[in-house]
Amino acid sequence: MSSPSKRRDMDVMKLMMSDYTVETINDGINEFNVEFHGPKESLYEGGVWKVRVELPDAYPYKSPSIGFLNKIYHPNVDEMSGSVCLDVINQSWSPMFDLLNVFEVFLPQLLLYPNPGDPLNADAAALMMNDKKQYEERVKEYCERYAKKSNTIKAPNEESDDEEISEDEDSDRHSTFSEDNVAGDADP
């Protein structure tokens, strides 16, 4: 077994033995989902997200691919794909980092200190810079709607209970969320 493989195995096992819930995909350790809780004393506190991790063959020399599977409203997270814009993962990754760093340091720091100057979600960045109060309300709204523990258990393409609503409730929902904001919902 080569050194990168041993390191990958060790990092995944360390993550599995920590307080995080880890679900492997296709019984391998190159792709898995991790249950991630929003950091305390942040707008995201109480939120629970399923985060997809894909490890490249060259891990730890090449960074993991990280993405939120359930929606999160954040300037540095693409609303449609869940991709994360974080320099330490995308540009300055080092083999000194491990998967626990991602979940215990990098993602909490991202949620605590968004960078609207380098956005993947331009709407969230603009709202954060122009109307902080409305931005904070939108974050909390998304946490309430999409970041509940029940949302992390379902596969990303399964419909949630809030999809089974009447036409009246549906029109109310679309008055709160524009079509762009719910574009990630499963197709009927």
Image (cartoon, helix red, strand yellow):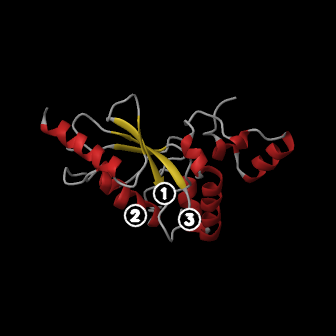
Task: Give the number of the mark in front: 2 or 1.
Answer: 1
The residue at 37%/29% (across/down) is: 27
Other-residue count near label 3 (Cα within 10 Å), few / some / many at <14 / 14–19 / ≥20: many
Distance between the Cα atoms at labels 1 and 3? 22 Å
Residue 128 vertical placement versus 33 (above, below) = below
Distance between the Cα atoms at labels 2 and 1? 13 Å
Label for residue 128? 3
The residue at 58%/54% (across/down) is: 123
Other-residue count near label 2 (Cα within 10 Å), few / some / many at <14 / 14–19 / ≥20: some
Q: Which of the marked residues, 2 or 1, is nearer the chain's N terminus?
A: 1
Q: Which of the marked residues, 1 or 3, is nearer the chain's N terminus?
A: 1
> Can the viewer see residue 119?
yes
Indicate the secondary structure of the residue bearing disc 3.
helix
Distance between the Cα atoms at labels 3 and 2? 17 Å
Label for residue 136? none
The N terminus, quarter of image: top left
Task: Give the number of the mark in front: 1 or 3.
Answer: 1
Task: Give the number of the mark in front: 3 or 2.
Answer: 2
Type of the residue with mark 1: His
The picture places residue 139, in percent across and down from the top left corner, at 59, 60
Residue 45 appears left or right of 13: right
Indicate the secondary structure of the residue bearing disc 2.
helix
Mark 2 and mark 3 in contact (Cβ < 8 Å)?
no
Label for residue 37? 1
| Quadrant in the picture for residue 13 | top left
Q: Which residue is mark 2?
A: 109
Type of the residue with mark 2: Gln
The picture places residue 38, in percent across and down from the top left corner, at 49, 60
The picture places residue 69, in percent across and down from the top left corner, at 51, 42
The C terminus, quarter of image: top right
Type of the residue with mark 3: Met
The residue at 19%/36% (across/down) is: 5
